Image (cartoon, rainbow, N blue to C red):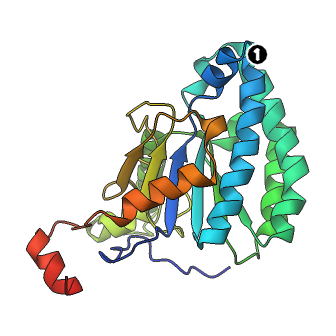
């Protein structure tokens, strides 16, 4: 697939539909607790919500959907729950990869995947390889990912290239650093959504969210569906994106 997106792009102030949506899928455990079910039941229900949202994103013409599936801090959860999450991740990769490919979806997993089992890493590589030439919606899964880790990892690569003489330190700027981050081909998110009433970005895509519109909802992730996604997109469509300009400047640019 060609690099269709610039590494850092200033999205048009008149866009009404986001090109890239990033979501923290929160509330699976609370959803299960409300129903006196084990937490893993909430995570399984969350997978069904992913299917619904992914389908609707395709229908709405969204180019990229990034989902925060497992953060670098989630290892702190009970060992049993982490193990069940890893099993669920592997099961979903095995069952969904062919469906994604059939629907022309490209899968990309970002994060420190070397911490996963060899078997899970192989399933990730297989799914990415199967879908790598698809040119429809990009589904980006952040797994064992942290925004600070991403920036530190990019900095290490930059330093190594400077030491090896492949890069002059005077060449380093925002665009250059951005090219060393995870999956630099994707456009920066236009819309960030977090479910379940939490109002934090929790170390997710720290670099990429600089000018992203934020949307928070009390809806628990397993209950988040096409209708809820449309509400978030509608909120986005009413916002004036200035990118450092004044409101008057934006209105002059758009003829408003």
Q: Residue at x 55, y 54 (%)?
A: 229
Is residue 35 in view?
A: yes
Q: Is residue 83 left or right of residue 194?
A: right
Quadrant in which the C terminus is drawn:
bottom left
Is residue 163 in view?
A: no
Q: In this rendering, is residue 47 above or below 239?
A: above
Percent position (x, y) of residue 13? 29, 75
Q: In this rendering, is residue 119 above or below 95?
A: above
Q: Secondary structure at mark 1?
A: loop
Q: Is residue 248 left or right of residue 2?
A: left
Viewer-nearest residue: 90 or 54? 54
Percent position (x, y) of residue 253? 19, 85
* Farthest residue, direction front: 227
Q: Residue at x 51, y 31 (%)?
A: 196
Q: Residue at x 56, y 61 (%)?
A: 183
Q: Residue at x 86, y 70 (%)?
A: 102
Viewer-nearest residue: 45 or 88? 45
- Corner quadrant of residue 84: top right
Percent position (x, y) of residue 64? 58, 65
Circle 1 sits on which residue? Answer: 37
Quadrant in which the N terminus is drawn:
bottom right
Viewer-nearest residue: 170 or 46? 46
Viewer-nearest residue: 90 or 18? 18
Percent position (x, y) of residue 236? 38, 60
How many numbered discs sit on the rendered protein? 1
């Amino acid at each position: 697939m060609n690099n269709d997106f610039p590494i850092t792009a200033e999205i048009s102030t008149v866009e009404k539909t986001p090109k890239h949506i990033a979501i923290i899928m929160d509330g699976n455990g609370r959803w299960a607790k409300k129903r006196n079910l084990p937490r893993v039941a909430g995570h399984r229900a969350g997978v069904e919500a992913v299917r619904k949202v992914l389908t609707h994103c395709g229908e709405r013409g969204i180019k990229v959907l990034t989902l925060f599936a497992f953060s670098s801090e989630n290892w702190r959860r009970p060992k049993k729950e982490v193990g069940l999450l890893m099993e669920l991740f592997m099961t979903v990769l095995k069952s969904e990869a062919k469906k994604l490919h059939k629907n022309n979806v490209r899968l990309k997993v970002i994060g420190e995947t070397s911490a996963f089992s060899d078997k899970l890493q192989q399933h990730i590589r297989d799914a990415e390889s199967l879908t790598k030439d698809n040119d429809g919606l990009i589904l980006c899964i952040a797994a064992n990912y942290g925004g600070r880790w991403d920036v530190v990892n990019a900095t290490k690569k930059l330093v190594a290239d400077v030491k090896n003489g492949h890069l002059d330190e005077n060449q380093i700027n925002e665009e250059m650093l951005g090219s060393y981050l995870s999956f630099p081909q994707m456009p920066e998110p236009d819309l960030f959504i977090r479910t379940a009433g939490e109002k934090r970005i929790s170390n997710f895509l720290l670099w990429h969210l600089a000018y992203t519109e934020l949307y928070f909802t009390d809806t628990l992730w397993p209950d988040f569906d096409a209708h809820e996604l449309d509400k978030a997109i509608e909120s986005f469509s009413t916002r004036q994106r200035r990118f450092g300009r004044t409101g008057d400047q934006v209105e002059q640019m758009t003829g408003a």
